[in-house]
Image (spheres, rainbow, N blue to C red):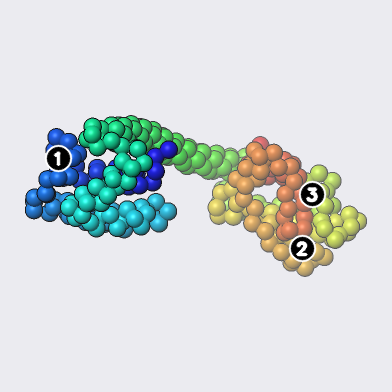
Amino acid sequence: MLPPSCFSTKRLIVDVIRFQPGETLTEILETPATSEQEAEHQRAMQRRAIRDAKTPDKMKKSKSVKEDSNLTLQEKKEKIQTGLKKLTELGTVDPKNKYQELINDIARDIRNQRRYRQRRKAELVKLQQTYAALNSKATFYGEQVDYYKSYIKTCLDNLASKGKVSKKPREMKGKKSKKISLKYTAARLHEKGVLLEIEDLQVNQFKNVIFEISPTEEVGDFEVKAKFMGVQMETFMLHYQDLLQLQYEGVAVMKLFDRAKVNVNLLIFLLNKKFYGK
């Protein structure tokens, strides 16, 4: 395993050779950098510092790396020479072959880094394609939902108009059409199987409860009023589309007024029969 000093030395070498080319590492280290090379290096380090400032804390570089970025080219070369001396003493590198092992290792790192970036780029492209496909599907399903809502509303409008025509055609002559309201005792709805139970109320008292169901101006919406012994108790807004959704989801029972449990399928059947002529 390479010692930690080797990694920092390799990083510094990469920084130096980017701005000061040469035939060998020894030649680069022994040749003073020009003022232009130092200036270019300084600008690059400033750009790096700006990028690093925008990087999340968990992904930021270590303190030693930041400190190295503040060094000039000449200072980095001096630090490289100190690192090479230590590595030579450890037998990791050999100055006789101009540190070729280290140069080869750096070349491998660069190739591996390039491959890694290529893989990351390919993965990013796939993620972008997946994201675009999901957005497209979301748009499609959103349009489908709007279509079905519109379709259901049209069906309800048609059912409502058919119900009005089939019920009392004679009343349309010379009179304004009057909305039909249904009145049932809880006992009668219980006999039909529509009403299952009312919390805190015995079945023998159902005859004292009257439910009145009236269509509203909005097609598919019904106002349900409850009276107990002639006294107005509560009002509940019933939405036909909600009933259809519950039926689609396989929900058999729902609550009205938070107390009365009704059979969803039989309530739909009652509304269809009385209001939509089905």
User: Residue 273 placed where, x, y %?
Assistant: 69, 41
**Is residue 218 placed above or below 276 in the rendered structure?**
below
**Mark 1: secondary structure:** helix
Residue displayed at 82% across by 56% down? 198
Q: Which residue is mark 2?
A: 227
N-terminal label among 3 and 2: 3
Q: How far is mark 3 from mark 2, CA to CA?
A: 15 Å
The outermost residue toward the bottom is 231
- What amino acid type should be assigned to the residue bearing mark 3? Leu
**Mark 2: secondary structure:** strand
Location of residue 203 by image quarter: bottom right
Q: How far is mark 1 from mark 2, CA to CA?
A: 102 Å
- What amino acid type should be assigned to the residue bearing mark 1? Glu
| Within-10-Å neighbours for mark 3: few <14, some 14–19, many 20+ | many
Tell me the quadrant of the picture where the N terminus can be found. top left
**Is residue 102 placed above or below 55 in the rendered structure?**
above
**Closer to us: 182 or 125:** 125
Left or right for 245, reference 20? right
User: Residue 34 placed where, x, y %?
Assistant: 8, 50
Q: Which residue is mark 1?
A: 27
**Mark 3: secondary structure:** strand
Q: Which residue is mark 3?
A: 195
Of badges 3 and 2, the one in the foreground is: 3
Residue displayed at 69% across by 39% down? 250
Of badges 1 and 3, the one in the foreground is: 1
**Closer to us: 92 or 34:** 92
Q: Is residue 196 visible?
A: yes
Residue displayed at 59% across by 48% down? 220
Q: How far is mark 1 from mark 3, CA to CA?
A: 96 Å
| Within-10-Å neighbours for mark 2: few <14, some 14–19, many 20+ | some
